[in-house]
Structure formats: structure tokens, C-alpha cells
Image (spheres, helix red, strand yellow):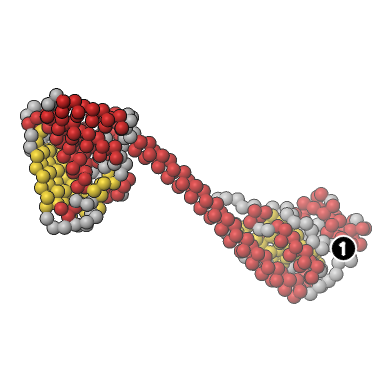
Amino acid sequence: MEVLNLREVIDIDLLQRIQDSFGEATGLAVVTVDFRGIPITKYSNFSKFCNLIREESYLREKCYQCDAFGGLEGARKDKPYIYRCHTGLVDFAIPISVKGQFVGSVLAGQVKLDEHEISRLEYITPGSTEWQQDEKIMESFNEISVIKFEKISSAAKMMSLVINDMVEKDVIRRIYEELNVKTLNLIEQMETRDLINEELKEKERNALQPLINPHFILNTLNTVSRLTIIENANRTQNIVFVLAEYLQYTLQNINKLVMLKDEISQIDRYLRIQRERYGDRIRSEIRIAADVEKTRIPSLILQAIVDNAIVHGLEPKEEGGMVQIHAYSSNEFTMIEVKDDGIGMTHDQYENALAEDNCKKNQAKGISISTVNMFLRDHFGDGHQLEIIHNQLNGTTVIFKLPTIQRSVTYVENTFSG
């Protein structure tokens, strides 16, 4: 439990002014003490007698004990407490509690009551008499006036109302200040976290940026294309044209959201290049519903999944196989499936495929499945991660969904074979 300091929860300067005004108006002496009875304000309207008493260290300690015990008794009763101090004078204690914790009290009095009224009050600590041997102290004691019990009782009630209202306002102010500090700290932490996350994402995205000047690559391909015309190498010329279009699209759309139909055209170029390499071993089938053609998708994401299917699923298989791409609408979403009939995945490969630490490990090999999964989650939320299914007749199916932008009702089919 936090130990509260009275100086931290109440405006001491304002309290001193209230205390001084109260003492002047009522003729009572006033002081505010902490829970140990140690004064935290200056004495207000203190009697000559009490000042003399407190000049003696052993008597001053008795006064502090009275102040502490008076405050504690008031806190126990949860109301102003009127009592006799060790010298027999009458005081009252206004307990100050914050969040149920007693932190101090306002003490006032230093007066006498007539014999009939004072008899109903108890000493807060054992009485002391040694000071009565001091003529000067006794003279000042006799100067203290006698007042009615009703006056000191009314003064205690009034001071209690003032102090409780003041403490309540100061506590509310302190709570607001603490909340404000916590809110500012939380905002700062969130902004720092978001900044770090954005920097990490930016670095991961920048890892996809080309390391070679794109204009150099395209100009080189144009030079190669002209050479193929001169040498009548028509097949080479065609593949160079496709590669140039492929690279131009890739360089223009890095880190962008593109329409699904444009990404499918890029997949077509990619597959044409791969068929030049693998021949009849690689076959493909693409079926895209026309009502999802304008769905937005992060560029290169779909190609990465197709590339993974070919490199890890079909290439190790001697006879090659088929990769199928299917996109259709379902419940306000565009569903995309990439299916191959390759060698499939082992249990360990399946477990590790989506692990985020694979993003950095596979960076040099292209865009990994785990990176694709991360991109989808960052762009569209946690409900859009990849789902990987091991097919019964070998092979793997990767499924994910995207928010659909526009729809119609027919299918556009584009089927390729080696």
C-alpha cells in the first residue's frame, strides 16, 4: 500500500491561509500535523502558554503525542474529536484521510472549559504536572480564557466542513494529475511502439526494393531484344519481351495495392517465363470470378504463393505437376486459393511455414510464405492470415481472403498448359 504524504495531497499554502483566518476569527489556536503528530504548518494564534510548553523538549514530545493520538482517535471515530491535552487544556482534532488512509489532522483549541463541562472530556494522554512548578508558565496558563463547550463544538464542525471540502478537491485534482501523467506516458509508449513497428515494417518492405538501377535492367533487356531481332531469335525475343513487362510491373508496383486482375496478368507473365524453363513439367489453371477482378491485393503477394508452390511443390517432382489459382466471392470477401499437386509438406515444414522468424531467414530467397502472411495481416487485419491445407492426394492448398471492392456475376477463365 502506498504511504501518502500529506504535503503531496493537499495545498499547504492554502491550508496555512485558512488556518490563520480561522484562528483570527475564532480566537482558537490552530496547527496541522502529519499522522505522527509532527507539525507541517506554522502555528496559528498559538497561546503564550503553549509556546512556552513547547520550548521544553520533553513537554514538546508530550504535545506531539497528544496531537498524534487526538488525530488517530478522530480518524477512528470518523468525525471531529474533542479532548483534553496533557496540560488539561481543551483541543479538537479534525482527521484528514485520503483513500481510507489517515494522513494527518488539523488541531485547534488551547482553551479552558468550566469545571462542569470539562469533566465530561477525557485526557488523550496521561496528564502532566511538572510544568506547574514554573512560575512563568503558570502565569501564562492562568491567562487562558474559559469558553463554552458549544463554541468549541461549533468551531470543530465548521473546520471539519472546510477541511473535508478542501481535501476532497485536492484529492480529485491529484487523481486527475496522476491520470494525466499515466495517459501521457501510455500515449508516449504507444507512439514509440507504433514508430518502432512502422520502422520494422518499412525495413521489411524496403528489403524488397531492387538493389540494381531498374532503368539499367530495362535498357539492357531492350538491347537484348534488338539483338534477337537481328539474329532472328524469335523465341528468345518473345521471352525477353515478357520478362521486360514482368520487371516493369514489379518495379512500378512495389509496396502498392493493385487490382487482382492486374496481379493475375503478372502471374501469367511469371508462368510463361517458368514454362520456358520447365517445359511441360509445369502446367497451370487460372479461374477468376469477374465480380472480384477489382479487389485490391498487395503486389507480389499472390506470385510469392505461386512461386512457393512451383519451387517447393512441383520442381522436386520428376514429372512436374499442376498449379491452380481460383478466386471467387464469399460473404463480402474475395477468397483466393492456390493449389498444387506437388510433393506436399512434412509436419515440420507445415509448423514452420508461417513462423515470423522465417521472414528474415528467407529474405535472400525471395518473399517467404511467412512474409506473405505478415503482409496480409498488416494490411487487412488478423482475420486474413494464410490457411495452409495438406491435400489428400499429395500437394498443398493455400487459402486467404481479402475485402471485395466490386462485383459482377460471371466468371473469366484463363487456362494455361505447358
Question: Image quadrant for the C terminus?
Answer: top left
Q: Residue at x 29, y 40 (%)?
A: 252
Position of residue 170 relative to residue 297, above or below, is below
Q: Please state which of residues 361 and 218 is positioned toward the viewer in this rendering.
A: 218
Total labels: the figure holds 1
Position of residue 58 relative to residue 205, above or below, is below
Q: Is residue 68 visible?
A: no
- Across and down, in percent, residue 348 comes to 21, 32
Q: Residue furthest right?
A: 135
Along the horizontal axis of the image, is 8 left or right of 65? Answer: left
- Across and down, in percent, residue 301 comes to 25, 41
Q: In the rendered image, which quarter is residue 76 located in?
A: bottom right
**Callout 1, which amino acid?**
Phe
Q: Which residue is mark 1?
A: 141
Q: In the rendered image, which quarter is residue 70 located in?
A: bottom right
Q: Is residue 285 visible?
A: yes
Q: Please state which of residues 152 and 215 is positioned toward the viewer in this rendering.
A: 215
Q: Residue furthest front?
A: 230
Position of residue 278 relative to residue 354, above or below, is above
- What crowding class fits label 1: few (fewer than 14 Cα within 10 Å), some (14-19), or many (20 or more)? many
Q: In the rendered image, which quarter is residue 18 located in?
A: bottom right
Q: Residue at x 48, y 50 (%)?
A: 187
Along the horizontal axis of the image, is 145 left or right of 323? Answer: right
